[in-house]
Amino acid sequence: MTNMSPSASANPDQHAGAGAPERIRVLIADDDAPFRRALGAILSSEPDIEIAGDAADGEAAVAQATLCSPQVVLMDVRMPVLGGIEAARVLNEIHPSSKVVMLTVSDEDEDLLASIKAGASGYVLKTSALDEIVDVVRQVFAGNAVLSPSMASKVLSELASMARRSEGLAAQPQLTNQELQILQHVTLGLTTREVGLKLDLQESTVKHHVGNVVQKFHVQARIAAALTELQTQDS
């Protein structure tokens, strides 16, 4: 799974601490009941993770999240009643502390962009091994962005193409000064929270500007930052 660094793939004991362990509360939203049960069984067997609830459609996921306040929501993209992307958008507005990871069989660019614009912190293919999804939960809980390898390739290709079309970020006239400043920070590996602290901005304001960059460049800056960090570690 892309963006899995030694420091981020923490030992469960590190999550637990000396006293009562802090467990990551996870909500699983997927209309595939067998997959939902299998994923729930794997996650609940981890000492630092607990299942806060589950849902079979997007509307139920929003209702469950309101009741159980999960820290991470694993959300299927395509579900009945209310789709996963729209449910992620609603959750990002009413429960922004819940980090949403889209689980999907789709590697379409349109779904990736829509998910990111909806506020998702990750986009992971269902074909990933279940134990890799466990690592994704920890990564997102720690504040990182996560992307499946096939989608990582798409983002890197687009970044390379974008770089060839311009002579650097400053040559992009459609970016405002603040968008450019934020993008320069996140592409160095900073999370939206860290950028907010550095620039004296609310994290929600940083996310808003990142969303604008996403619309203009069709690329998600936080994921680009995660990929940049991975390349640096591997070099």
Image (spheres, rainbow, N blue to C red):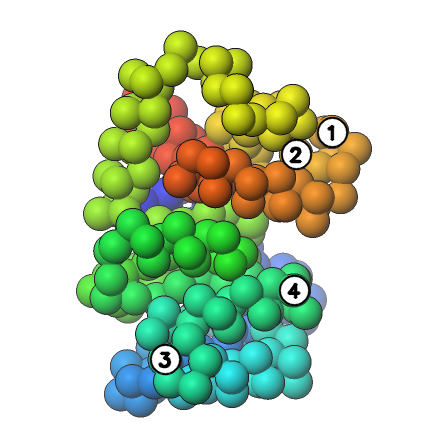
- Residue 209 appears in the figure: yes
Q: What mark, if any, has residue 79 been given in the picture?
A: 3
Q: Earlier in the sequence, mark 2 or mark 4?
A: 4
Q: Nearer the viewer's eye, disc 3 or disc 2?
A: 3
Q: Are marks 1 and 2 in contact (CB under 8 Å)?
A: yes
**Is residue 174 shown above or below 118?**
above
Residue type beneath disc 3: Met
Q: Quadrant of residue 183?
A: top right
- Determine whether, in the image, residue 150 is placed left or right of residue 33: left
Residue type beneath disc 1: Leu
Residue at 61% x, 30% y is 179
**Is residue 50 shown above or below 118?**
below
Please provide percent x and percent y for residue 125. Answer: 27, 61
Please provide percent x and percent y for residue 136. Answer: 40, 57
Residue at 66% x, 40% y is 206
- State the CA–CA distance, disc 1 to disc 2: 6 Å
- Determine whether, in the image, residue 105 is placed left or right of residue 31: left
Residue under numbered circle 4: 93
